[in-house]
Image: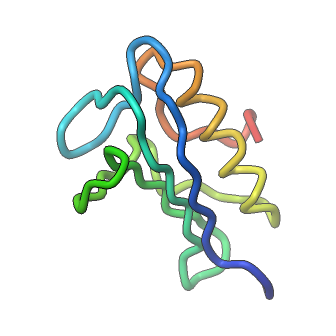
Amino acid sequence: MTGRRQWCDEVLAGPGGAMTDEVGVITGPLTLRTTTLPDGGLVRIEVQYKDAEEWYTLTGSPVPHRGDPAAVHAAALAAIRTGHAAEAPGPATH
């Protein structure tokens, strides 16, 4: 795979926020970062409070990207905007 290896966007979490492995649900203005892993078939999805230093793993990450890591990032953004303790998108959602 060639090209872009990381996507990063600000997102406002919907009601119920986003679920993380480290601290549970986080809410409010967040930053989402999706990074392709060296094996090429998986992406790691992380979130942080906007402008914070600490990154947290979005529950369910890493996930396969099926050749389109940008689609996984877009699906994760949509899930976080929806809220409800959003987790990393599964293969059926991207």
74 vs 34, left or right, is right
Q: Residue at x 53, y 46 (%)?
A: 10
**How many numbered callouts?**
0
* Figure quadrant of residue 64: bottom right
Q: Residue at x 55, y 85 (%)?
A: 38
* Figure quadrant of residue 55: bottom left
3 vs 45, left or right, is right
- Quarter of the image with the C terminus in it: top right
Q: Residue at x 69, y 50 (%)?
A: 72
- Quarter of the image with the N terminus in it: bottom right
Q: Is residue 4 above or below residue 93?
A: below
- Front position in the image: 59 or 12: 12
Q: Indicate the position of residue 75 as horizontal and vertical percent values.
A: 69, 39
36 vs 49, left or right, is right
Q: Indicate the position of residue 47 as horizontal and vertical percent values.
A: 40, 49
- Front position in the image: 34 or 59: 34
Q: Residue at x 39, y 14 (%)?
A: 16
Q: Indicate the position of residue 37 as horizontal and vertical percent values.
A: 54, 76
- Front position in the image: 64 or 7: 7
Q: Is residue 40 above or below residue 26?
A: below
Q: Indicate the position of residue 36 as horizontal and vertical percent values.
A: 60, 73
Q: Is residue 38 above or below residue 73?
A: below
